[in-house]
Amino acid sequence: MKLKKQVTVCGGAIFCVAVFSLYLMLDKLQHDPARRQNSGGNFPRSQISVLQNRIEQLEQLLEENHQIISHIKDSVLELTDTGAVSPSGHLPFRSSNGSWVLPFDGRAAFLSIKPQDCQFAQGPRSSPMLDVYSLLSFDNVDGGVWKQGFEITYDPNEWDDEPLQVFVVPHSHNDPGWVKTFDKYYYDQTQHIFNNMVVKLTEDPRRKFIWSEISFFVKWWENADIHKQEAMRKLILGGQLEMVTGGWVMTDEANSHYFAMIDQLIEGHQWLERTLGVIPRSGWAVDPFGHSATMPYLLKKANITSMLIQRVHYSIKKHFSSTRSLEFMWRQSWGECTDIFCHMMPFYSYDVPHTCGPDPKICCQFDFKRLPGSRVNCPWKVPPRAVVDANVAERAALLLDQYRKKSKLFRTKVLLVPLGDDFRYDKALEWDQQYQNYQRLFDYMNARSEMHVQAQFGTLSDYFNAVYKANDVAPGTRPPDHPVLSGDFFAYADREDHYWSGYYTSRPFYKNLDRVLESHLRGAEILYSLAVAHARHGGMEGRYPTTDYALLTDARRDIGLFQHHDAIAGTAKEVVVIDYGSRMLRALVGLKRVIINAAHFLIMKNKDVYRFYQTEPFLETFISTALQHLLSRSLRYLVVFNPVEQDRLCLVTALVNTARIRLLTEDGQTLPVQLSAQWSSAVLPTHSQTVHGLDPLPLRTVTSDSQPFYIHSQALTLGFSGTTGLLETIRRKDDPQVMRVQFQFVTYGTRPSKDKSGAYLFLPDGKAKPYRQKDQPVVRVVEGPLFSEVVAHYQHFEQTVRIHNVPGVDCLSVDITIMVDIRDQANKELAMRVITDIQSEDTFYTDLNGFQIQPRRYFQKLPLQANFYPMPTMAYIQDGQYRLTLHTAQALGVTSMDSGQLEVILDRRLMQDDNRGLGQGLKDNKRTANRFRLLLERRQSVNVLDSEPVSFPSITSHMTSAYLNHEVLALPVLPKKRGVPPLQTFAPLAGTLPCDFHLLNLRSVQNQVTTPSPYTALLLHRRGLDCRLESHNLGFNCTTTHGQLSISSLFRGLDLQLLQPMSLSLMYSSPPLANDSSVSLDPMEISAFKLKLR
């Protein structure tokens, strides 16, 4: 058995400010309160107002000062209580209770969050989806021709005074990868759709079409000749072709993180604006498998006024249809100003048989691609007939009957009828069949006033504009009597008890890789933007490798492509998954190059000696190989990049092959280290209990014991089962109560009937069964000054539970990694269950896209699989005393089966297709590391004003999630023949960010595909906070500022020459602000600004 050593380094004595930190400690003296809500920096004219403002500011500063002093005092008392007197003065040492103590470095960290920053906008309460779920029986009664609905009747005279307006909207849904790869779909089908579009739409100006997937459109545009490009541009600008949503893909809404959802939207919108001058106005999402409340917020912030959704539980659709609530204002749970007008399609699918009306047997007769002789036919055995003079009257009457019935489900006499399906209109013949036959029907209907209908082809925005006009309201405004709704539409079921909750976990390896890529993309964007700005500031534009922008663009598009609802969802064919994986690996390599090139420039003490050589990188991206390569040298340098907004107490891990390690800071201070073995096997060598007689890592074996055992840190004590090696209890240092937090592993099978679990569906064979194996697990315990951990080896998984002994965020939670390998299983799903004494009853909470929290209830009236929900970043349970949050570094499916429980599906291996078109099971599993942080928080009584019935994470929880999803990057400096030039810490921010602000991105704006413009997009998110949980020493100075932030004083060494508020996707601009303005964000608000930094 081979053993390697690894050294874990905690920077700074105990305070690790990453050497390449993006942000500085918060300094109260550098914050100018006089600039709050003062765009021009001028005081009001009235001297009384000035005096009042100054008095209020002074009161706030006094309050904050009191809180600061209180927290500093608490920190000192904590150290006194531990008896923390280092015998050596600076090295880690053991306290009287046996736990390791690190020395206090003299820096006071405080937490000062104002109660006003914990309350949210008040407004009329909308109807949450949770109430709808409570109301419905989900009985699935046969509705007749509309199987999942009901019979629809109408009075033929209803339209005598106001004719029915019908907009038939041709479309083609093109998956950027599913059964075929993105490129194969393009060459086999999509390019022909565009080529035919240019010809066939030009033939008649009455013809309309909509398109969504910009990734395909860009590929066609780049391969089209100038004549086709100009013809296409004319169609778009003339209103015959509308770009809907305009994102790079039609994103998945369950597993995608809001960073990536925004980024792919920006990538599509920026290309459209730059190339065509087009600004999307309407959202179109017909195929994501359930809909998140995050998407309407992002579209609203991008200035899209209306949106459409389709895949919603059939019982929800029936309820909304019966109450004529299919069109509603979709509101975020925290505020009225977030409303966006939403249209929900009422029937089973977005294909032609399910869009003209309630009877698919009749609607299929008006899908003229299915005319006799076609490869596609109607399952209802009644084929379409071409429309001719002899049958036009009968055909028009039959179709109008369906239109009228469908219109009865809405409150306005304007009807939307989509006309399309997957990869439709790839043959010129279909264009003729659909457009010519429908035009004959329209001409006949419109010419006969007694039919009281006006039918035409239209775009999605044509339809929405007609709805607004009919209601006499401005676009995006709530029509009279239309309902308001908040919440989301998970889990989705298309029929019976077939719930699409399996894809929340399918292919977790790629879900985890996606999150790693997103963190690298964000880091690369920020560093590149700063490096380019500093190069401009220093007059070195020609010497910095701006060609790296092409790598950024490629990575944006590859990561954007993976947000497609068959990519990150894990629901594509194996060959397509391999293609996605290859693109993601290429993106990761490119992003690492951008990061090391930017870091190289920024840390140079003397920029004049900076030289860039493409073949000789200054830094290495793979730390394990780099440090071992440098072992022959007496002095090595390691650059550390902290991508989080705040100063960070952290451990940095590096592989070495010697125990003789000494680590120094830039100014020569010794850092504590912990040596730990890297294991290549779960078991010890049989010939000896130690690896080497002189090895500094003595190893010993012990027999299993029924008694629990413990590991300790300054903040936590964890208890483990002596037989299973799994976590059982947690006790916080400041809490006498020992909390039961018991881990179990369980498995699900699939049904024995014809309907089985697959990539999309979760159809279990009953309740979960305990995971069992014949042999006792191998359990390994490591204890040390910086971290302690317990590793339990089982046949199909390896669980590592680690606690950090570093003050700050890391020490407050339990670090959990579960390495899963179920490649030898068949039709099995492995789940992790956490059992506690928290009295959560049937309520639990999951996040939506890492952006917001959605309350959930476990409904006994629904099948087990209906109670699973997506968990992109966290889920928690709580009662009046405690909250337990499970943070995750990859999207997975989660539920709470019983009070006090959380359960997460870790991986699924399924041998068959689930009859949703994929044609494969899930058999390409990989050995996957699922990473979590478990945070136990205690409630406290604070004066928080009543707010809307919503839930938010605490500041500790927000920071825990940020640390988990944005790891510190360690970049070794490669050896140089002439030696390493002088380096220095680069800290880009002269001001500070309040700790409820998240710097979502600092993104260079495009000029052309491969070059950046002088402008940078700054995206900020102000987090919503729950302040009713106990605050802790987070290891950095944390304060809030009522949402105020001064941009001009933010960047060190750069001049701010432009500060302009923008829409989220940068397509709409407001007048520029004065450069010394402060910007203001409400809680939960995401805002974008165009900056010119030099």
Image (cartoon, rainbow, N blue to C red):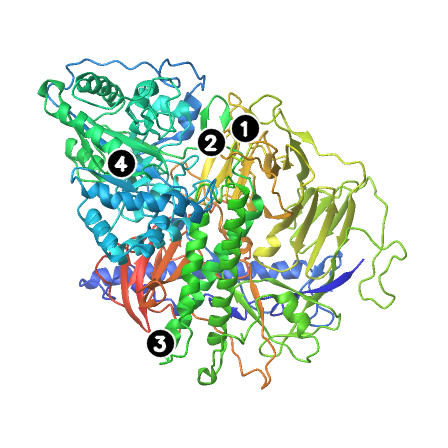
Q: Position of residue 142 (x, y in %)?
A: 41, 14
Task: From the image, state whether disc 2 or disc 4 is nearer to you.
Answer: 4
Q: Nearer the viewer, residue 508 or 424?
A: 424
The residue beneath circle 3 is 536
Task: From the image, state whether disc 4 or disc 1 is nearer to you.
Answer: 4
Mark earlier in primary sequence (3, 2): 2
Under tag 4, what secondary structure? helix
Q: Give the CA distance from mark 1 to mark 2.
A: 9 Å
The residue beneath circle 1 is 865
Under tag 1, what secondary structure? helix
Task: Check disc 4: other Cα within 10 Å, few if <14, some if 14-19, many if 20+.
Answer: many
Q: What is the three-letter code of the residue carrying label 3?
A: Arg
Q: Give the CA distance from mark 4 to mark 1.
A: 42 Å
Residue at position x 22%, y 14% from top?
154
The residue beneath circle 2 is 491
Q: Position of residue 645 (x, y in %)?
A: 46, 61
758 over 589 or under it: above or below = above
Task: Check disc 3: other Cα within 10 Å, few if <14, some if 14-19, many if 20+.
Answer: some
The disc at residue 431 is 4
Q: Quadrant of residue 427?
A: top left
- Answer yes or no: do the residues labelled 1 and 2 have beta carbons within 8 Å? yes
- Answer yes or no: do the residues labelled 1 and 3 have beta carbons within 8 Å? no
Q: What is the three-letter code of the residue carrying label 1?
A: Gln
Q: Give the CA distance from mark 3 to mark 2.
A: 50 Å
Q: Quadrant of residue 757?
A: top right
Q: What is the three-letter code of the residue carrying label 2?
A: Ala
